Image: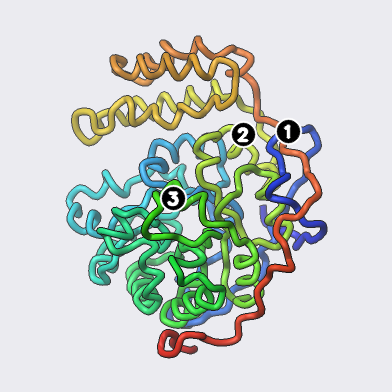
Amino acid sequence: MNSAINNLRGAFFSHSILTCTYEKKSFIIRNRFSHQFKRFHSSMGKHLAHSSTNVNGEDLPQLFSVAPMMDWTDNHYRTLARLISTHAWLYTEMVVAETIVHQKDNLDRFLAFSPIQHPIVLQIGGSNLKNLAKATELANAYSYDEINLNCGCPSGKVAGHGCFGARLMYDPKFVGDAMSAIASNCDVPVSVKCRIGVDDRDSYNELCDFIHTVVSRSPTAHFIIHARKALLSGLSPAENRNVPPLKYEYYFSLLRDFPEIRFTINGGITCISQVKASLREGAHSVMVGRAAYNNPWNTLGQVDSEIYGASRIHFSRRQVLEKYQIYGDSELGKYGPNKPNIRQIVKPLLHLFHSEPGNGLWKRKADTAMRHCTTIESFLEETLDAIPDSVLDSTLPIIPPEEEGVFFDKTLLPPPYKSCQVPGLCVRV
């Protein structure tokens, strides 16, 4: 795929009314990224956020990505995801910089991945410049396609006790310096994942000040924007994903006010029809979180053909499981007894039959089998009779229908950002 996506415009599509049912009519979105990004620092141009990477001779832009999720997007999930979609960009779980530094003699356990997982992004967390730099240097040997800094996690363990994640949005100068340190120690593009604000620092101008400062102090040219603010006290991580209102107008205003920067939209997008609607409105790229984990077949199964325009390949979940079984049995005990164990390797499979006949029985049988099975092969033999052959052998679903509506309210777009609003905060280019 080497053609550029048309910059499609037209009617807005509603986040609230876009459904996730399927019909036969398909609509192919082509790669819209043909422009080159302005070099802010010519001496560090290699770190700019390229719109694509080359995988097996194919140019893959980062149109669709799966969000980094702690305890979810591990090696096992990413392997399953790649068996379903060859084009989606995958993000690791956040790996704390200190873990990498202190486990330098055991790095494979935390950083190694199969080459089939490309394109893949490593997300790092931390608030110590020296450790962030060293961790990046160590991770660079693993040939990730991008290094990302977590500035959006509101978890008490991360933003509270750890003093990083979303709390870093309070200190954009530090984030800029951290990104400079990260970029200086790797050979790939670097990016930041953040919220639109934190606590009462949630105005559009303050978000722009954050972006401006980070860009001014580093070669960062890609931001993943979770379109909700983070509340660092009073809400759980789950509540922080749902209670603060979505403000997509902030995201689309950033496209207007920072045309040299690439922005990925994240938050509240749960199916491919919504991904396509946001791309149609001009979003550079889209990141999907729990929908890609909780319903991988219906979500990831659409990505290659409907987002990237690849030919639809007809394969079944039975075929995916046959390949995953080979992978899983080769991984058992790789790093010592029960490291990983059956339960860890099976965990990503538990959502493969989301909303399908037999799904409930399959999960109950799986819970029992995980307690005594010693191989993935024996686990599947014991449990898959709960799923009808018609489900196991069915091929990928048809795309969601296109429904006209309003994806975001254009009347809510804030005025254009003109300059830094906080004296002493920003360093101007």
Q: Tell whether 211 sits left or right of 101.
A: right
- Name the residue: 53% across, 79% down: 39
Viewer-proximal residue, 271 or 53? 271
- At a point 63% along the width and 42% down the height, the residue shown is 271
Q: Residues within 10 Å of mark 1 (few under 14, many from 20)?
A: some
Residue 395: numbered disc: none
- Asked whether the beta carbons under mark 2 and mark 1 sit within 8 Å of each other, the answer is yes
Identify residue for label 2: 298
Query: Which residue is label 3 attached to?
Result: 68
Q: Position of residue 310 (x, y in %)?
A: 68, 44
**Residue 391 falls in which quadrant of the image?**
top right
Identify the disc placed on residue 22: 1
**Quarter-of-image position of residue 299:** top right
Image position of 376 with respect to 190: above or below: above
Q: Is residue 401 left or right of residue 364?
A: right
Task: State whether residue 370 is above or below residue 401.
Answer: above
> Residue at the spot x=36%, y=61% of the render?
165
User: Do residues under tags 1 and 3 come within 8 Å of each other at their CB atoms?
Assistant: no
Q: Is residue 46 left or right of 159 when viewed as pictured? A: right
